[in-house]
Image: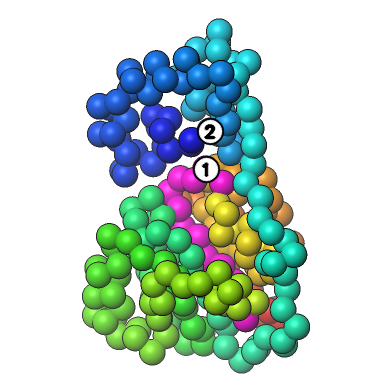
């Protein structure tokens, strides 16, 4: 439901929201109940439907199967920091901020392996970026994979990176946290609900590749 509200990820949805603003408002006002994922999205919904309809709004956060997405039994390799990205490769997810952060790691000779899980309209441009900057030996693209394989990547990796410019509430981050991963994510809707800085993750500002690289560099000095 969150994506329909004007204000969500304007780079992706501005014209959609502009074109359908009145129909979306009408549908929401006619609905008996509306669910959203976070407080930020609740505020967006309130701005759209007006005070007289506030009582029909409910926050229902994302959840995940913590019995399935659980820590693995294998000891993780500490000689190479394994990073993953999971999700659609779109402007909303801003994967290029992550790739720019990798350039900083290269300059400081920090050993890493980045696995990008997912697909989307930016994939071809990302592949070209990796080739131009000669990162093919450090960055891999898997496309969409099975749920079982996804769990294996979570269990074998150290850090999930999420550079989204906006979110409802990231299911991938919930899954990664359930397997014991550390998260470096942008400070967007939902992330501050479950990331406790310095404990299970770090929060950075949107489009801040330098800060993301510094967080990763700091973690390499600890036992990850």
Indicate the quadrant containing the C terminus: top left, top right, bottom left or bottom right: bottom right
Name the residue at 32% across, 30% down.
Answer: 17
For residue 1, above or below residue 117: above
Magenta highlight range = 156-169
The spot of residue 127 in percent (x, y) is: 28, 75
Q: Main secondary structure of the magenta part?
A: loop
Mark positioned earlier in the residue sequence (2 or 1): 2
Out of 56 and 50, give the one closest to the viewer: 56
Q: Decide: marks 2, 1 in contact (CB < 8 A)?
A: yes
Q: Inspect this view and state whether residue 198 appears.
A: no
What is the CA distance from the residue labelled 2 to the residue labelled 1?
A: 7 Å
Q: Disc 1 designates what residue?
A: 168
Answer left or right for 64 relative to 185: right
Answer left or right for 220 relative to 140: right
The spot of residue 207 in percent (x, y) is: 41, 55
The spot of residue 99 in percent (x, y) is: 38, 70
Indicate whether residue 166 is drawn in magenta: yes
Please tell me in which quadrant of the rendered image residue 138 appears: bottom left
Name the residue at 30% across, 85% down.
Answer: 134
Answer left or right for 139 relative to 46: left
Q: Under tag 1, what secondary structure?
A: loop
Out of 150 and 176, give the one closest to the viewer: 150
Name the residue at 51% across, 87% down.
Answer: 111
Name the residue at 73% across, 73% down.
Answer: 71
Q: Disc 2 designates what residue?
A: 41
Please tell me in which quadrant of the rendered image residue 144 appears: bottom left
Circle 1 packing at 10 Å, graded few (<14), some (14-19), many (20+), is: many
Kindly give the residue lying farthest to the top in the view shown.
52
Answer left or right for 124 relative to 73: left
Q: Under tag 2, what secondary structure?
A: helix
The spot of residue 73 in percent (x, y) is: 75, 83
């Amino acid at each position: 439901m969150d994506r329909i509200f004007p204000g969500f990820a304007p780079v992706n949805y501005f014209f959609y929201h502009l074109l359908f603003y009145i129909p979306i408002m009408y549908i929401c006002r006619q609905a008996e109940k509306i669910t959203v994922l976070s407080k930020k999205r609740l505020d967006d919904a309130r701005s759209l439907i007006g005070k007289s309809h506030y009582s029909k709004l409910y926050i229902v956060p994302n959840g995940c199967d913590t019995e399935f997405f659980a820590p693995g039994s294998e000891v993780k390799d500490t000689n190479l920091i394994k990073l993953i990205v999971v999700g659609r490769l779109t402007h909303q997810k801003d994967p290029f901020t992550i790739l720019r952060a990798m350039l900083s790691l290269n300059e400081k000779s920090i050993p890493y392996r980045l696995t990008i899980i997912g697909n989307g309209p930016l994939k071809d441009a990302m592949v070209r970026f990796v080739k131009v900057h000669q990162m093919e030996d450090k960055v891999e693209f898997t496309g969409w994979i099975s749920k079982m394989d996804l769990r294996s990547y979570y269990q074998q990796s150290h850090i999930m990176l999420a550079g989204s410019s906006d979110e409802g509430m990231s299911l991938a981050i919930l899954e990664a946290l359930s397997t014991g991963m550390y998260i470096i994510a942008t400070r967007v809707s939902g992330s501050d609900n479950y990331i406790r800085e310095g404990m299970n993750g770090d929060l950075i500002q949107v489009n801040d590749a330098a800060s993301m690289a510094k967080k990763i560099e700091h973690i390499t000095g600890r036992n990850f």
